[in-house]
């Protein structure tokens, strides 16, 4: 089942990060970026946060599951949609731990 755009819009609204939180559609699902860094995925209308020390510190009891077939388990942050401050902090702290994306090579 593909994720609905309205779900991604809702996640962005709840997180309250404005234009810093962007998304890109991929294979019917979405990658969410904070300041250009991938921090989460929206798959099957659920929010999967990238595993990191931020999750272990802020939300260690989140359920785990694969965002798509064949993927490793990710923390599922759907319950944090009811706690905007914690969701925002988790996204910001996760972004702080993620590397910058590699620059794209220019085609010759």
Image (cartoon, rainbow, N blue to C red):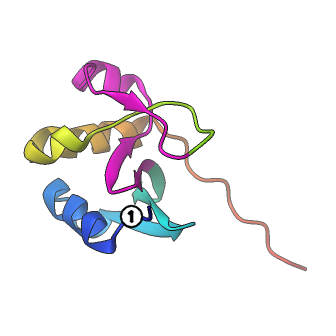
Nearest to the observer: residue 45 or residue 88: 45
Magenta range is 39-68
In the displayed structure, 30 sits above or below 95; it is: below
In the displayed structure, 33 sits above or below 56; it is: below
Task: Judge left or right: residue 29 versus residue 86.
Answer: right
Report the residue at 38% width, 43% height from top: 48
Q: Position of residue 24 (x, y in %)?
A: 48, 68
Q: Please, which residue is most extreme toward the right here?
A: 108
The N terminus lies in quadrant: bottom left
Q: Position of residue 63 (x, y in %)?
A: 31, 27
Q: Please, which residue is most extreme toward the front here?
A: 1
Q: Which residue is mark 1?
A: 3
Nearest to the observer: residue 47 or residue 24: 47
Q: Is residue 59 magenta?
A: yes
In the displayed structure, 50 sits above or below 102; it is: above
Report the residue at 27% width, 27% height from top: 62
Q: Residues within 10 Å of mark 1 (few under 14, many from 20)?
A: some
- Secondary structure of residue under mark 1: loop
The C terminus lies in quadrant: bottom right
Report the residue at 59% width, 38% height from top: 71
Nearest to the observer: residue 21 or residue 9: 9
Report the residue at 28% width, 19% height from top: 60
Q: Position of residue 84 (x, y in %)?
A: 11, 47
Q: Is residue 14 magenta?
A: no
């Amino acid at each position: 089942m593909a994720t609905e755009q309205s779900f991604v819009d809702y996640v962005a609204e709840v997180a309250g990060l404005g234009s810093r939180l962007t998304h890109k559609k991929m294979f019917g699902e979405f990658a969410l970026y904070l300041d250009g860094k991938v921090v989460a995925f929206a798959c099957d209308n659920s929010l999967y946060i990238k595993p990191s020390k931020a999750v272990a510190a802020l939300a260690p009891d989140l359920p785990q599951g694969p965002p798509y077939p064949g993927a490793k388990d990710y923390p599922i942050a759907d319950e944090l949609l009811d706690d905007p401050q914690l969701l925002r902090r988790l996204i910001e702290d996760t972004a702080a731990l993620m590397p910058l994306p590699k620059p794209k090579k220019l085609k010759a």
